[in-house]
Amino acid sequence: MIGAGVFAVFAPAAAAAGSGLLIGLVLAAFVAFCNATSSAQLAAVHPVAGGTYAYGRAELGAWWGYLAGWCFVIGKIASCAAMALVFAAYVAPGVERPIAIAAVAALTIVNLLGVTRTALATKIIVVLVLMSLVFVVASGVVAPPAEAGVLGAGFFEHGWYGILQSAGLLFFAFAGYARIATMGEEVRDPARTIPRAIVFAFLGAVVVYGVIAVTTLHVLGPAATAASSAPLADVVSASGWGWGEPIVRVGAACASLGALLALVAGIGRTSLAMAREEDLPRFFARIHPRTRVPHRAEIAVAVVVIAVIALADLRGAIGFSSFGVLLYYFIANVAALRQGSAVRRYPRWLQLAGAVGCVGLAAMLPWQSVAGGLVVVAIGIVLRAIRLVVERRSV
């Protein structure tokens, strides 16, 4: 969760809401907490690969599961594009697109070889990222404050619409706990381990994001934050610690590549689960006999991600990703709401609030993201409907 999002998401959020992004962060965190508890409750009962795709099928029916899986795949494909673009913005400003495409191709090859983020590698990445974020905060403490200050023209300069839009965009940075839930078949004691991992990861991320948001607004102000393609590097530069910019850029690179590697693996496994149920072509259900990787699914994901990078900018990728993932979690909340008292870990009002919050934040995203998301969701519905009609006629 503490990945590339924290290095990039504050710029589009500031463009939408100015200093009101701080209120947006609180709203995004609340909706994300509702989603996290729903995911934890579902994962404890259904410790299988596929995340909400599997939960939706089990609790609500095949159509709900399909929609969850489809929204996850399209949302996370956009996340992959965003991660790659963040990586390129920090390590190679000015040539973002070719570098981002190269990063996707390289990490896809790594995944195809069966090399994943081990627990040790994850710990190393998190330590490096946190060290770079601590450095950003330390530089912010000694930096002169921006002329506009943290609040700029006030929390409500852009109105509630801007604040809610910023919350939808900031939600992008919280969505990592979905990848924990997709690994239900690959961890020990998943009924205990996955819920704990989801909740603790979420709480840690909230603290980090809050501190970084205040630091960035304090040093740059809302307008400069909105205009920046690498806001945390600009914080360090504005503090007079320009010599330390490479520390932040290395942290961003580690976060981006680590998140991208995990994303490709997570999308591949959800696609595998969908292909097994024929919600995607059976062609993608093939697992490589030696590496045990769903290689066809991962190659297809890489091709689509590269196409998104070629066509979209970072803000568009973040908005589209948030739209798909918010709909995914809407289904997770509805599925958890349906669970009985025997397996209930959290009160129903949390799941109801999460469902309403997901729909509300999705509707407030930039209209291009909403329109594009609705079109792609409609395409997914039509494709499954056609397949079901063909199957019925062939019987």
Image (cartoon, rainbow, N blue to C red):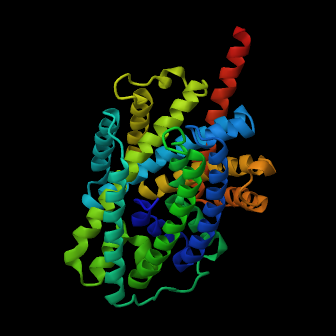
The spot of residue 74 in percent (x, y) is 53, 42
Residue 81 shown left or right of residue 70 in the figure: left
Residue 382 shown left or right of residue 166 in the figure: right
Seen at 64% across and 57% down, the residue is 35
The quarter of the rendered structure image containing the C terminus is top right
Q: Nearer the viewer, residue 359 or 49?
A: 49
Seen at 78% across and 62% down, the residue is 349
Residue 148, by quadrant, is bottom left
Seen at 46% across and 36% down, the residue is 268
Q: Nearer the viewer, residue 224 or 200?
A: 200
The spot of residue 117 in percent (x, y) is 36, 47
Residue 225, by quadrant, is bottom left
Residue 91, by quadrant, is bottom left
Seen at 62% across and 34% down, the residue is 380
Judged from this view, the residue extending furthest toward the front is: 189
| Residue 93 is at least partly visible in this image | no
Residue 94 drawn above or below residue 388: below
Residue 238 shown left or right of residue 298 in the figure: left
Judged from this view, the residue extending furthest toward the top is: 395
Residue 153 drawn above or below residue 324: below
Residue 181 drawn above or below residue 386: below
Residue 90 drawn above or below residue 303: below
